[in-house]
Each structure stands twice: as C-alpha cells, then as structure tokens.
Amino acid sequence: MNTNYFKLSTTTIITILLFVCSHLSGQVLTLTGNTVINDVSELSSYNEVDLNGYHLDLNFSGELLKDFKINSSVQGDTTNQKVTIGENVIANKLSIADANPGFNLFLNVLGEAKVPSIKFKTEFSSYLKLYVGENATLHNTGIAEVFYSTLYIDGTFKNDGNLTSLSANSIDITIGETGKLEVLSNVFIGQYSNINIFGEFYVEEDLRVYAYTIIDFGEDCDVGKLTVIQSIILDVHNDIDVFKVEGCGTVNQSSCQEFGTGGTVNEGRFCGDLPVELVYFKGFQENNDHILIWRTATEQNASHFEIQGSYDRNNWTTLGSVQANGNTNFAIDYEFVQRGEKFAFYRLVQYDYNGEYSIFGSISIGNTNEFTSRVFPNLAHANAQFKLEMSGINSELPLSLNLFDHKGNLVWNTELPVSLGDNNLVSSFQIDRPLTSGLYLLVATNGSKKEVNKIVIK
C-alpha cells in the first residue's frame, strides 16, 4: 500500500496561519449605546471599536494585551463620543484611527495608555478633547496633529514626535500643577491659542509660537515651568502686543528669536537678558514697620520697581514703587518701608522702559522653621547667572552652597553672608570655574538643614 504525504512549505504554513488569524480577530465592536467593559475578556473577540457617537468606558483591572483601534463611523462630538481608560487599566497597544474624513473624540485617560500617533485635522472636521488625569500616563510614540483641540493634563503626556496645530489653527493647552507635557521633538502653537502652564512643559527641540497667543503661568511663581532645549521662536507680525505672557513662572531656554513680516523685531518677554542683576532682596520688621531692602549689581534700561504684598502668594496688591537708575554698572541699594497693613509675603516687579518686566521673590517676614531654597534657571550654560531664593534661614548659623557632580564630587562651594535676624534671601550668583555638561546637585546648607536643587549644565 502506497501512502502519499502532502507536504507544505514553511512559507505556505505561515500564510495560511496569517489568513486564519486575520479572519478570527478582525471583528469590530459597534456601540449602540454607552458601554462599560468591566472584564478585559469582553474584548477578546474584537480588535477595533466603532464608537458610533457613544462612550466606551474601559473599567477593568489589568492590561489589554492586544492591538485595539479606536474609530467611529459618525462624526459625533467631544462630549458624548468618548473613550475612558480607567484608573486600573494598562492599554499600551491602543491606536486611534486617523480622523479622515473626520470624527470627534474625547479621550479620557485615567490609567496608562500608549498610541502610535494622534491626528485630528480641521480639513477633515475632526477635533480632539484630551484629559490626562493625575497619576495617569499617555505616551504617543509618533506625531500629534491636534488642530482646534483641547488638552488638559494633570498627569503625564509624553509625545515623541512633533506636537503641532500648524500656524493657522489654535489649540488650548492647560497643564495643571501636577501635570507634565513632555515633547521630545518640536512644538508648533498656532495663532489665537491659549497655553496655561501651571505645571511643567518640556520641549526637546524648538517651540514655535504664532501671533495672538497667550501663555499664562498663573500667579504662583513656584509651579509653572517652561523648558525649551533649543529655541523659542515667536512669530509676532512686527507687533509685540499680539503675543502676551501672563503670570509668574520659570522659563529656561537656550535661545530666543522673534520674527515679523519684515524680519527680526525687538526682543520681548522671553528674549534677552534680565535688565537688572539682583544681588539680594530681603526684609525685616522694625518697630511696627516692614522694611524691604534690595541691591542691584548692574541695571540696563531699568525704569522702576513695584513692591507687591500678598497673604497667600496668589493674589498680589501693589503697595508702591521706587524709581530705578536706568543704566548702571555699579551696585545700588534700595529701600521701601511698608507702614500700616502688613503682608505675609512680598515681591519685587522690575520694569524696564519698554514695559517688559521681571519678578523677584517672594519673601516672607517673620520666623519660620521650614528651610526652603529654589534656583533657576535649572538648565543653563556653565557661565550663566543663577537666581537663588531662600526662606526659613537661621541667621545665627552658617549658610553655604555646595555643588556636586553626578558622581558625588564637590566641584564648587561658597559661603553666603546673612545679617542677624534675616530669614529670607533672594540673590544671584555665578559658578566661577569651568563645568562639563551634565547633571549637578546644588546643596544649600543652613546649620543641620539642607535643601537640594538639580542643575543641568549644557
């Protein structure tokens, strides 16, 4: 008896398997109403959802291990057409269909999610509303094209590619105090946009901002931070009034350029050096008065100082002004006496002749046991002028700064003079020795108390 064997090549077997798998796993879950998924196994037969105008709530505990695409056959809106990634969900194989010809989406990330790209463009009448909750993470490994979209970030949104609304399309971005927007490429902010930075905004390459945009850091000087590794580029159309920066935050950038229709125009809020080099700003009580004193080392086009008081460091009241000295290259001492109402915190607002301003402080007058320090910029060149703010100082004990490299070696140190009774200090300093690029730790020491700040030298 002869037996014939049917032999298949390896290529043929793989082809058959791929054909069978694609037909078994290719089902689309089409929503007919708002749907809650409480167990990941409920998605085992699907690799795509058609939202169809409804809300898909992933509310299970665990990881979605398969590829799963978000799509919609209807345009919908950013209120009802929604996907929620629950607090206990890990969905690192999600994808969002390119919104072409267009659908609207509210992506509500409360857990952990990863997508390869985000594309919502106005030519396809598609809009995105994104919320990343506190302790949540969204990682986009590609480009984000988000025209006329709204992003609210209380957690972490990491974007590996460009984040853009191009020049003609606005975008609203709010980074909460606990939020971080980290873009590892370029950012293009279209005209008429609103950018609220109450947390941290980090850009690995260039940040380009188009006209009629407002960037607001809020009133708390200690929280809002913008870091741009390469350049900030402002398209101001030869009118500095069409670009506005509000609030009090920290800006770190390598360079800044402003362009209008006729080429480069005058430097504004981000561009140029601070016009005043402040040596210190401090205060003390004398009888029933609060005495505020400060010293400048140099001044450039300095018009005047406003002195402001606050009870909560959020709401500030202007108490008076002191005339500056314009242009000087020698030290000048200033004093302001606050009589009557006493405030918990004080700060200086220094204006130059073209209306631009810089904020120094805040400081407090009175005893406090909490020793704190803050240094900025925390990303700078080795010869940069650093600004230092300290509070809770015990003036009877030595006050010093020590700079350590990433291996723990002491590379620079200095003693800071403090007058008896002073418990606040706002000052500036330079590191008078060459430093290589990398991470350093600046340790402020006051007796047995220590505060550590990170500095990155470019």
Image: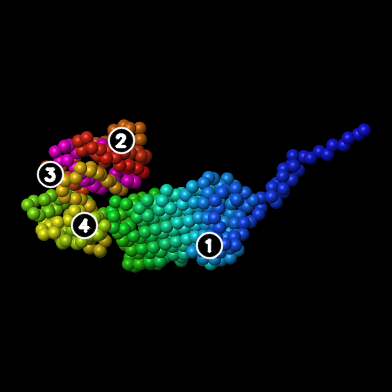
Amino acid type at image mark 3: Gly
Of discs 3 and 1, which sits in the foreground? 1
Q: Residue at x 13, y 59 (%)?
A: 341
Of discs 1 and 2, which sits in the foreground? 1
Residue 182 at x, y percent in the picture: 43, 50
Disc 1 to disc 2: CB gap under 8 Å: no
Write down the residue under mark 4: 310
* Magenta-drawn segment: 378-404
Q: Earlier in the sequence, mark 3 or mark 1?
A: 1
The residue tagged with tag 4: helix, strand or loop? strand
Alpha carbon distance from label 3 to label 1: 61 Å
Amino acid type at image mark 1: Gln
Write down the residue under mark 2: 404
Write down the residue under mark 3: 421
Write down the residue under mark 1: 81
The residue tagged with tag 3: helix, strand or loop? loop
Q: Is 393 colored magenta in this rendering?
A: yes
